[in-house]
Image (cartoon, rainbow, N blue to C red):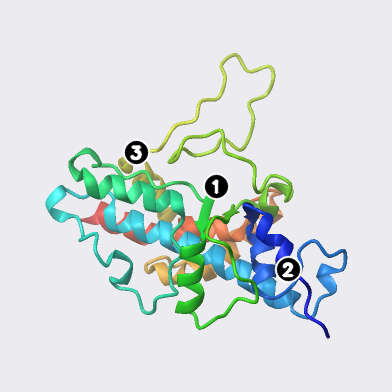
Amino acid sequence: MESPDLSAWKLIHVMTLREAACLIAGIDPASPTVEQATNYPKAMVIERAMMDAIERANQWAWLSLDDKLPEEMPPSDGFWSTGVSRPGDYLPSFELLQEMAAIFREPAEWQITTIPDPEYRATLQVQQIETWLAGNGLTSAFQFAPHQEITATTLENNFASQQHAKPSPYPAGMHRQIEEAPSSAKTPAVDRVLGTRERNNLHAIIGVLCTGLDFDLSLAAYASGVAKKVTALADAQGVVISESTIESHLKLVADAIARKKA
């Protein structure tokens, strides 16, 4: 089968994570039969793997930097190689790298670390994509141009796919208010960032409740299995929340419980 001509995609400055995954797998994302392409399943796996690596990078950065005194901060050089089993484990977004640069520049001003929320926006630059691909022994069928960027979200259906590449109206580090306040509300909803103590308290409460249900979260590695059970409970109650979102929070429970017991 003849390979598709992907050269026109070099004209695109900002693309979605799915479009990038298709291009890496050698598929034209604009093709009307894209889902019938032989490599489409591979593209879907690449998309999911990149999203997992983005979330993993955010979690690692928060656990490593949050609530640290200046003298306790890890070195900025080689940060992503510390405790990493292989180079392709993490895929830090542009927003995350910007936030971390500010933290390392003035650690005394960042007692509480606010990591950009990947549920709302994460931008990947070509250099990060190439490093991640090489770290996982993958090659791309498409040669990305240096000016190109990829945007991703972790929300269910990526905001129904049509909002992937829209510029964000929210400042870096702010959590997006997903549910709009009812029109009858007297006061408008206000976005705010949870402080370290409040966030740890909430994760500790989740841990206590899960323990009461015999859901073992004593290790972050157990979060995946527990997330499946919690997702099933949510589905049974008509609560729509993705399994990946649940898992990302459950992974932080063990650390929050440990802090409360210290």
Quadrant for the C terminus in the image: bottom left
Where is residue 108, by image quadrant? top left
Q: Which mark is residue 195?
A: 3
Say whether residue 126 is left or right of residue 197.
right
Say whether residue 121 is left or right of residue 42.
left
Q: On the image, numbered disc 2 is attached to which residue?
A: 6
User: Closer to the N terminus: mark 1 or mark 2?
Assistant: 2
Q: Under tag 3, what secondary structure?
A: loop
Q: CA distance from mark 2 to mark 3?
A: 46 Å
Q: CA distance from mark 1 to mark 3?
A: 20 Å
Q: On the image, numbered disc 1 is attached to which residue?
A: 121
Query: Considering only vertical position in the picture, is 239 above or below 223?
Result: above
Q: Residues within 10 Å of mark 1 (few under 14, many from 20)?
A: many
Number of on-image labels: 3
Where is residue 261, by image quadrant? bottom left
User: Closer to the N terminus: mark 1 or mark 3?
Assistant: 1
Q: Which mark is residue 74?
A: none
What amino acid does circle 2 point to?
Leu
Residue occupying the point 60% across, 76% down:
140
Residue 177 point in image, percent of width and height = 56, 35
| Residue 53 visible in the shown view | no
Quadrant for the N terminus in the image: bottom right
| Residue 262 visible in the shown view | yes
What amino acid does circle 1 point to?
Arg
Q: Nearer the viewer, mark 1 or mark 2?
A: 2
User: Closer to the N terminus: mark 2 or mark 3?
Assistant: 2
What amino acid does circle 3 point to?
Gly
